[in-house]
Image (cartoon, rainbow, N blue to C red):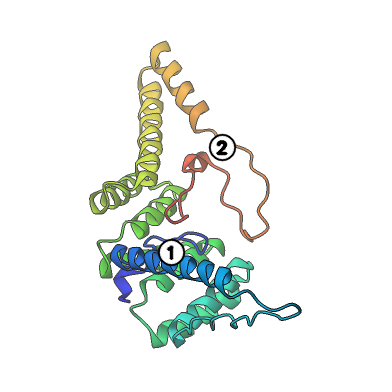
Amino acid sequence: MTQRSRSLLSPATRLVSRLRPVAAAVRSARVLALTGATLGLAGTLFALPAGAQAIIDPPPPAPLQTPQQASESAINKLVGAGKFSDALAKIDDHLKQYPRDAQVRFTRGRVLMEMGRNAEAIDAFTALTQDFPELPEPFNNLAALYAQAGEYDKARAALESAIRNNPGFAVAYSNLGDIYAKLAQQAYQKSLKLAPTARVSNREKILSNMLAPQRAAPVSQTPAPAKASDDAALKNVGKSGN
C-alpha cells in the first residue's frame, strides 16, 4: 500500500476504502455458494449418529499487521480516546520512521487543531498540500483554520484548490458557499459605512442571521472549543471527508 492511497479522514471514516478487486470478490462468492451446496448435500447423506458432535473448525487467525499499521492503530486509539498529548507524542515517533505517511501526518494536523495549536496545524497542513497536492482534505482543513483567523480570502483560495483536486468533494463546496457568504457580508458592511441604504441593510441582516453561530452541545473530546464567532458557519470543516 502506497502512502498516497491512504485515506485522510477521521478514524471513523476513510478516504479510500480498502476494497477487494471485483473479480476476486465474485470468485469468492461463487466458492462460498458451491461450498454451502456441498455441505447441505453431505448433511443429507451422512447424518451424525445419535449423541455424536460435529467437529467445528477453529476460527481463522486475525490478519497480521505490519509494524507501521500497528503504530497507526495505536495512534487512532489515542485520538479516539481524546488523549491528544499522548497521540501527538506517538505520532512524532511514528513519523521519524515513516515520514511519508500522509494519513498520520494528516492526523497530526487534526490533533493540533483539537489542542488549539492552530499555527502549528497550518504548518502541518501546508506541508501536506506541498508534498501531496492531489489530496483535497488538507486544503479543506487549511480553509477552516484561515476562516477562524478571519483570513477569508486565504480560506477561499484553499477551498478552490480542494475542488480543483477533487470536483466531487461536496464538503468543500458547502464550505466555499459559507466563505462567499461571509465575504458578501463584509462587503455589505463596508457599503453601509460609506452610504447606508435600506436595501443593503436588509441584505446584511439576512446574511448576519444566516451566519450566526449555532448553539451546540459540548463535546468531551474537544479540550479547546472553537472560538465563538461568525466562522462557526463552516460546518463539518476539519473533519475528513466529511
Q: Is label 1 or label 2 in front?
A: 1
| Residue 112 image point, x, y percent | 50, 66
Residue 89 as seen in the image, left or right of residue 193:
right
Residue under label 2, please give it. Answer: 213
Residue 32 as seen in the image, left or right of residue 153:
right
The CA distance from mark 1 to mark 2 is 55 Å
Viewer-closest of 230 and 106 = 106
Residue under label 1, please give it. Answer: 33
Q: Is residue 12 above or below residue 55?
A: above
| Residue 98 image point, x, y percent | 38, 84
| Residue 113 image point, x, y percent | 51, 61
Q: Is residue 192 above or below residue 228?
A: above
View extreme (front): residue = 45
Secondary structure found at label 1: helix
The reply to whether callout 1 and callout 2 are in contact (CB within 8 Å) is no
**Residue at the location (58% across, 80% down)?**
59
The part of the image, by quadrant, that contains residue 100 is: bottom left
View extreme (left): residue = 164
Residue 57 as seen in the image, left or right of residue 100:
right
